[in-house]
Amino acid sequence: MEDTMTEQLTRTLPLLDEAGRATLFTAARTANRFADIPVTDAELREIWELARWAPTGANTQPLRVLYVGAGDARRRLVEHMDEGNKAKTEAAPAVAVLALDTHFHEHMSQLLPFRPELGDVLGTNEELRTSTGRFNAALQAGYFILAVRALGLAAGPMGGFDATGVDTEFFPDGRWQSILVVNIGHPGENPWFDRLPRLDPADIVRWA
Amino acid sequence: MEDTMTEQLTRTLPLLDEAGRATLFTAARTANRFADIPVTDAELREIWELARWAPTGANTQPLRVLYVGAGDARRRLVEHMDEGNKAKTEAAPAVAVLALDTHFHEHMSQLLPFRPELGDVLGTNEELRTSTGRFNAALQAGYFILAVRALGLAAGPMGGFDATGVDTEFFPDGRWQSILVVNIGHPGENPWFDRLPRLDPADIVRWA
């Protein structure tokens, strides 16, 4: 009982301060033009060092990341981007293709050792495996975008690309399936459009 | 040209500091037991005030949030939780049911005014509407979990519940479809299990 104060303190988690909220949520913007400042491989690795700790259902962690460097690989990616996304993807200092590992269940005995049967269940039930994989990969894509921002970088996520073309080009064995392409860099001149409207919270949040 | 220095500074975004990284990613944990400290409605509203700014594909914003208070509503929710999730969902200071608005496309003329045709495209192409809605709602669920943490609260996201039962109970008109239930509060005694392993970054991140 004499430890109530300490106990109380250990129970109280720190808030994210205003600067942190601005960096991740309130001031951050989707970038369409990038400055001519390189993004290092160390920075790209650090994005995943952050994003990997955020939670997934049954610890499945189905998201995978392919960083596409400048040069030939980038040109092969740009071919499959929608017209409006080609120039900025070509010019971005770094580009990530986020993908679902369709065989994520093969890691389950390592990832959830106290439920050794789950890998088999997911292995035989393709519908469950697909819905679980897609949901959790998208959840992790959200973490990835915020982790890019945590590194002081701007993200430009794009759904506008030919996924089949990208997969054939970069994942020919069929195991990874692209879900999002994310340009990454420091913002350049006029880097973003006007902010698009958000729905009124009264239309989003209800109470029961 | 004399403004190069200033220009450079405006291009440089702030990093998230170590404390912020700990709060959102590296030290944060999924809570299974909560302290007897209330979570206020103001805090619950503030979660969305943060999460709503993070980006979605074509600005679709398909995620919706139902906060289920204590008492009768909570009991009706707990009935549909998997056995292992019942007690903690009953005891949590606050609980959010995250849902997909299956008719999110009806807002598109407001959300993406320069592409007025997109609402109709999504309205008539059910397959595209469903895949777009599910992907972006899951992406926003990731933002939501990190926004809970930004408020100094612990999140306990759970996929283990009967979604059809929850939807019939809380969303009888069929428009919203539950995708995740998230317990929210301050961590209690022994609030979390040992941290589960993460995949080796070498298995996640590739380079092309």
Image: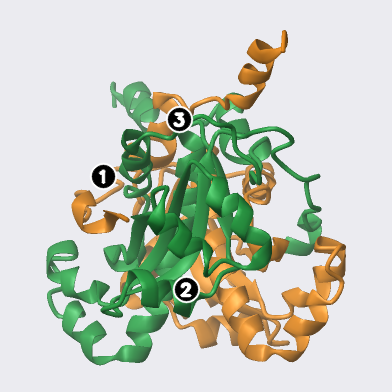
Chain colours: A green, B orange
Considering depth in this image, is B1 or B94 the residue closer to the camera?
Answer: B1
Q: Does the CB distance between marks 3 and 2 fall below 8 Å?
A: no
- Reply above or below: A4 against B72: above
Chain containing the residue with disc 3 = B
Q: Tell me the crowding category of disc 3: few under 14, some 14 to 19, or many 20 or more residues within 10 angstroms, Cα based.
A: many
Give the quadrant of the C terminus of chain A: bottom right
Considering depth in this image, is B133 or A118 the residue closer to the camera?
Answer: B133
Labels 1 and 3: the sequence-earlier one: 3
Labels 1 and 2: the sequence-earlier one: 2
Element under label 1?
Answer: loop
- Where's residue B79, x and y in %? 47, 79
CA separation in Å, label 1 and label 2: 22 Å
Mark 3 residue type: Gly
Mark 1 residue type: Asn
Mark 2 residue type: Val
Element under label 2?
Answer: helix
Q: Is residue A85 visible from the viewing direction of this image?
A: yes
Give the quadrant of the N terminus of chain A: top left
Residue for badge 3: B20
Closer to the observer: label 1 or label 3? 3
- Where's residue B149, x and y in %? 48, 42
- Reply above or below: A78 against A54: below
Q: Is residue B93 visible from the viewing direction of this image?
A: no
Residue for badge 1: B190
Residue for badge 2: B78
Left/right placement of residue B30 relative to residue B8 reads left
- Reply above or below: A13 against B123: above
Marks 1 & 3 on one chain:
yes
Labels 3 and 2: the sequence-earlier one: 3
